[in-house]
Image (cartoon, rainbow, N blue to C red):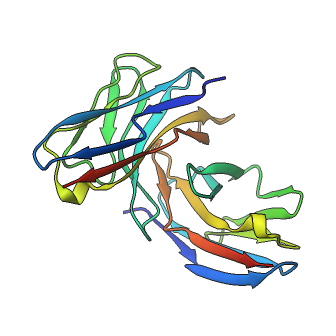
Amino acid sequence: NAGVTQTPKFQVLKTGQSMTLQCAQDMNHEYMSWYRQDPGMGLRLIHYSVGAGITDQGEVPNGYNVSRSTTEDFPLRLLSAAPSQTSVYFCASIREGKTGEIGEAFFGQGTRLTVV
Amino acid sequence: EDKVVQSPLSLVVHEGDTVTLNCSYEVTNFRSLLWYKQEKKAPTFLFMLTSSGIEKKSGRLSSILDKKELFSILNITATQTGDSAVYLCAVEAGDYKLSFGAGTTVTVRA
């Protein structure tokens, strides 16, 4: 079972470059999210999606774009990389609970991004 | 703004000790609270607590939810070095957004 496939594992960018982090899930989950994790700050929500064609902003959306053209894929785009975007990024695919609430989140392996 | 606050930020214990981790929250329209364990990579799921399930147990780990006082506790008994990790608490506030606390770093010394 693949679960959540997130690529790449590591990336170094120069300031101003753009890139896309890929995320794909094979569990047919409607809910997917992108988080960044910085030391001492837990996971902060960047963008999330409740289904194909529907996305919304999280806590720290500036500098990032997302789209959800299919249930399986939820790519995250960095438009013009800045050193402040140096972080570890996690994609999550989230099972829906019995009464519609968010259930267990399945995380990708993470992407360690450095912007120089 | 939704808030999830975990305490303590870190602690060091010896094998065999019991650990109690706290998670308090201020969210509108609470629906679920989840606990995760994070070692050197992605978080892994431990428990989910909702209005209909306010107490969970799995082996040496257990968790309760107090919806009136807006907090949850994660207990680990008879700790082992393999329990060393960051423990994350997350809350869903009815808008399909999962908000995480900063985490508690637990170090278990042999």
The quarter of the picture where the N terminus of chain A appears is top right
Task: Say left or right for B42 vs B16.
Answer: left
Q: Is residue B108 above or below residue A55?
A: below
Q: Residue at x 47, y 63 (%)?
A: A42
Count of numbered circles in the view = 0
Along the viewing direction, whichever of B109 and A41 lies nearer the viewer: B109
The quarter of the picture where the C terminus of chain A appears is bottom left
Residue A89 percent coordinates (x, y): 40, 47
When asked about the image quadrant of residue A74, the answer is top left
Residue A113 percent coordinates (x, y): 32, 49
Name the outermost residue toward the left: A16
**Residue B50 seen:** no
Task: Say left or right for B42 vs A81.
Answer: right
Residue B15 percent coordinates (x, y): 83, 78
Task: Say left or right for B30 vs A19.
Answer: right
**Residue A105 seen:** yes
When asked about the image quadrant of residue A94, the answer is top right
Q: Residue at x 50, y 65 (%)?
A: B101
